[in-house]
Image: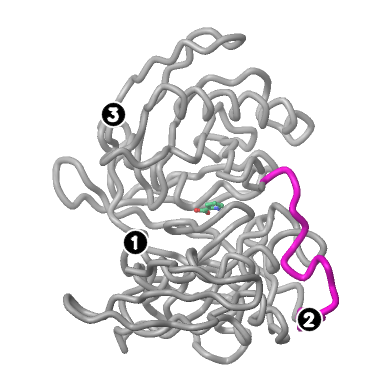
């Protein structure tokens, strides 16, 4: 656990719990001073959705589990997160991936995913992007590997042609047929499921799920999101449902479904969303509408696709696997000049 004691713009005092009985005083773990360094990032996209992997110059998060490291990152280094994602160095649609050492030596790396408003539990497209990035920098070769994330370990297979299959965390449907009565939209029915993030999945679509309609789809999905928040409709243990996923028939003949996914920061996923496809597979498995071992082709709103499959763990939970392709498109050194008034990113509509 980390507790903020006080501080000013340049220095902050934190108490960090180490084990059950010991506390360590951290002085001046200033996220602003972190920003004075240069940060090496590699940018890739997975089926159209970008991932920015921080491979050098990220904050030191100390020892502990990935959950503890993620908590420290969130509490102490939020300016760093913003500077990597927000304008002028980034864009709202980027997902960041901070590589850090895992306490499990069998893992190729630990990783913390984040976006324009905070941390993500897991990220499917991001894991595929991290896999291809680790290969790009010569850290791994084709074959099977593991990654440590704050919500558990995930494994992946890196194949020829930048193609990656990930085995996601256990996924399940928490509630079926939840009916929402939303001003301006009327009755919206959907399921609540976990696929590494919480999703509300619905067949309600105000218009066709195509690129030209993304503004209207964003507005509608935001209304659903606000309604869930306002009425305290959550995932298990009161966790916020911060992803909204709409489904329609696919455009490609060999696909099974098309989706539009609104992410927590109000932007939409250009890929079919790995955790969202996992949540979808959990619902299909719960309804016995799709058999384990058969390939589900999920199209995104831009027409890119993931292949999904699953193994059953028990009556409720499955292990989804998601296959997609990523391409590295940039290697950059991001700089934070001390005089730059926007070195911690531009405080826009998401602040
Ligand atoms: O692929 O799981 C995913 C994801 C989550 C948010 C953006 N992409």
The quadrant of the rendering that contains the N terminus is bottom left
Residue topped by disc 1:
151
Q: Nearer the viewer, mark 2 or mark 3?
A: 2
Q: What stretch is highlighted in magenta?
A: 332-350
| Mark sitting earlier along the chain (3/1) | 1
How many C-alpha atoms fall within 10 Å of the one at disc 2: few (<14), some, or many (≥20)?
some
User: What kind of secondary structure does the magenta stretch mostly adopt?
Assistant: loop
Q: Is mark 1 on a helix, strand or loop?
A: loop
Left-right relation of 197 to 93: left
| Residue 341 highlighted magenta (yes or no) | yes
Farthest bottom residue?
138
Q: Earlier in the sequence, mark 1 or mark 2?
A: 1
The residue carrying pointer 3 sits among few (fewer than 14), some (14 to 19) or many (20 or more) residues within 10 Å by Cα, namely some
Q: Callout 1: 10 Å neighbours few (<14), some, many (20+)?
A: some
Instruction: Look at 40% across and 73% down and name the residue there.
Output: 69
Cβ of mark 2 under 8 Å from ligand 1: the answer is no
Query: Which residue carries the number 2 mark?
Result: 335
Q: Which residue is at a point 48% across and 56% down the rendered structure image?
A: 120
CA gap between label 1 and label 2 equals 31 Å
Per the image, the residue denoted by label 3 is 175
* Viewer-proximal residue among 234 and 278: 234
Q: Position of residue 179 (x, y in %)?
A: 39, 15
Residue 246, horizontal then vertical, whole percent: 54, 30
**Distance CA(mark 3)–CA(mark 1):** 21 Å
The percent coordinates of residue 79 (x first, y second) are 63, 67
| Disc 3 to disc 1: CB gap under 8 Å | no
Q: Nearer the viewer, residue 107 or 288?
A: 107
The answer to whether the beta carbon of the residue marked 1 is less than 8 Å from any atom of ligand 1 is no
């Amino acid at each position: 656990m980390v507790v903020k004691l006080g501080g000013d713009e340049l220095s902050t005092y934190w108490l960090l719990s180490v084990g059950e009985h010991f506390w360590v005083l951290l002085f001046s773990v200033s996220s602003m001073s972190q920003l004075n360094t240069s940060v090496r990032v590699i940018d890739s996209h997975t089926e159209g959705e970008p991932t920015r992997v921080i491979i050098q110059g990220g904050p030191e998060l100390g020892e502990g589990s990935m959950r503890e490291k993620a908590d420290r990152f969130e509490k102490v280094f939020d300016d760093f997160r913003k500077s990597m994602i927000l304008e002028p160095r980034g864009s709202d649609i980027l997902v960041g991936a901070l590589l850090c050492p895992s306490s499990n030596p069998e893992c190729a790396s630990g990783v913390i995913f984040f976006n324009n408003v905070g941390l993500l539990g897991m990220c499917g497209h991001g894991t595929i992007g991290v896999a291809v990035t680790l290969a790009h920098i010569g850290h791994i070769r084709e074959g099977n590997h593991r990654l440590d994330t704050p919500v558990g370990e995930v494994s992946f297979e890196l194949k020829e042609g930048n193609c990656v299959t990930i085995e996601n965390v256990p996924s399940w449907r928490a509630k079926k047929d939840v009916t929402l009565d939303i001003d301006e939209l009327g009755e919206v029915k959907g399921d609540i499921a976990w696929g590494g993030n919480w999703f509300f999945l619905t067949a309600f679509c105000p218009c066709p799920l195509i690129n030209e309609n993304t503004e209207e789809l964003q507005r509608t999905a935001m209304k659903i999101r606000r309604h869930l928040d306002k009425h305290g409709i959550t995932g298990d243990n009161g966790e916020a449902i911060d992803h909204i996923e709409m489904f329609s028939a696919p455009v490609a003949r060999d696909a099974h479904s098309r989706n539009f996914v609104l992410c927590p920061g109000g932007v939409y996923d250009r890929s079919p969303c790995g955790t969202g496809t996992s949540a979808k597979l959990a619902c299909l498995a719960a309804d016995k509408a799709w058999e384990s071992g058969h390939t589900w082709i999920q199209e995104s709103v831009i027409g890119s696709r993931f292949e999904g499959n699953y193994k059953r763990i028990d009556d409720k939970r499955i292990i989804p696997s998601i296959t997609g392709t990523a391409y590295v498109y940039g290697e950059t050194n991001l700089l934070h000049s001390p005089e730059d008034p926007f070195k911690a990113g531009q405080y826009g509509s998401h602040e």
